[in-house]
Every structure is written in structure tokens, then in C-alpha cells.
Amino acid sequence: MSKSNMRFLGWSNIIVNGEGSDLVFDPFYRKMYGADWAKAEDFDKVSVICVSHGHHEHYLDTPILAQKNGAIVVSSPEVCEHLHKHHKISSNQLRPVMPFEEVTVNGFRVTAFDWHHRPINYLKFFQGSLKAASSFMFNNIMRSPWRARYYGFVVTPPTGPIILNMTEGMNPLFSNGELDALRRHFHPDILVGGHQLTYENEVARCVAKTGVKKCVLYHPHEKLFNQMKIVSAPVTEVVKAVNRTAPKVEIILPKPMESFAV
């Protein structure tokens, strides 16, 4: 199996290198909630943008990059409609897809699939930080297609393994039957996704059920949760859970702005 070169830029923001241009999941680089990682120039080679859902920390910088780079956006019809209506992104740059619909863009094969977002306890947000919670609510409701459906993506680069990006979907709402269907349909090599809260056993279950050889795990809300005083299981506990459930799987834990090969 050949390898893919990737880079984690914080949040749920991962770049996959292609032949001459890159694909990015959920680009988000502005300074917010104390996070100051990526810059616009880190995305200069991006020609494909996959947006998993319409929450602001997955969405707000997408129109900027689409306009700057002329990149193609692959996402749900709701996200694509919002980009066209509110940001005047040309229809030629938009690829609205339905679950299990495959498109090929600049050498990357991309297929979307549904997942389920964990319940959000907004009361906890406001109890932790009024300023951060107010910003979170305003940016979601007023500036983003926050009601858009939730997509994961299966991406096959021009050369490299099959990447299954579950983003924030590794939670109790993602059923074993759905995971089995992903494994049968795509035979993925690498799982990419976020670990957060106390879902370490759910992360391990997803790693095991998808049958991958490697997994890339990151905390998607590290800075935001710190401000809101929301506690997550230590990464050591996540690693222990994966090792118990899928002992042969290689675990990659990139830091923000770190490049790696898988």
C-alpha cells in the first residue's frame, strides 16, 4: 500500500496532498477561541474542499478559500446552496452530493456518507464562558448553514490509500450497522476522526468496526472546550481504548500544524 502525505492544521482541518494540488477537509484558520494555528497561505495548493457540515468552525473560511483559489467544494446541497446564495460562489465550483454519490475532482475520488452529530448541551457552553458561547451561537445561527446534514467522506487520492474521514461522527449515535456498511462498501485503509468528551470507547469501536490498518486521531475542539471548561478524556485513555479493541491498528496523533505520512 502506497502512502499519502497529510497535514493536520488544528480543529477538524486536514490537508491531503495530491499530484500538483491538495484536498482539504473543513478548512478553518482564523483566530478564534484562543486558537492561532494555520494561515491562509497554508492552503495555497488546495483545489478541493470537503465540508462535513455547516457549523461555523467547519465552514466560515470555506468561501474565502473558494474565492481565493477557485477550489471546488464537495458537500451537502445545503452547504453548497449557502455558498452560492450568501457568498456568490459560482455553481461551477460547487459539487453538491448525496450519500454514497461519488465524484472525481482534480484526481481525488470523493464519496460522502451520513453521520450523526452528538447532542450539544448549550447550557454547559454558557456556564463555561458567556463570551465564547455567544460567539459560537451567533456564528452558527447567523453566518453558517448550521442545519445542513452531516457528512463524512471517503477519499482516494491520485496515489495512496483509501481514507475514511469520520470527523466528529465517532459517538454513540453512529450504529454498528452503519459502520459495517462503510467497511463493506469502501474497504478503507485509514480512518481519520476527532476524539472528544468521554467517547474514547466509541472511538475505539469505530476504529475496530471499520477494519482500518491505521487511524489518525485529533481533538477537534481543544481550544473551544478549554474556554468553555468542557472536559474530555485524556488522549492516553483514547489510545488505551483503541489498543484494547483494535490492538493491531497503528495510531497517529498529530499536533496542530504537523505533517505526516500514512
Image (cartoon, rainbow, N blue to C red):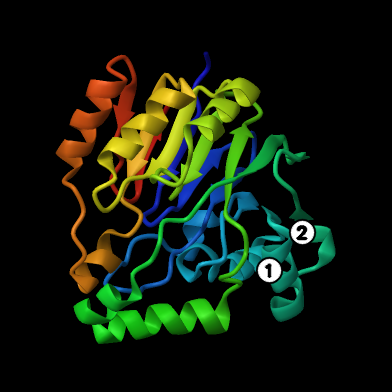
Q: Position of residue 65 (x, y in %)?
A: 60, 64
Left or right: residue 164 versus residue 236 is: right
The amino acid sitting under disc 2 is Leu
Q: Quadrant of residue 159?
A: top right
Q: Is residue 162 above or below residue 147?
A: above
Q: Position of residue 146 (x, y in %)?
A: 56, 71
Residue receiving disc 1: 67
Q: Quadrant of residue 82?
A: bottom right
Give the structural element (helix, strand or loop) at label 1: helix
Q: Residue at x 76, y 77 (%)?
A: 85
The answer to whether any part of residue 251 appears in the image is yes
CA gap, disc 2 to disc 1?
12 Å
Give the structural element (helix, strand or loop) at label 2: strand
Q: Is residue 85 above or below residue 106?
A: below
The amino acid sitting under disc 1 is Gln
Residue receiving disc 2: 94
Left or right: residue 238 versus residue 1 is: left
The tally of labels here is 2
Q: Residue at x 62, y 53 (%)?
A: 49
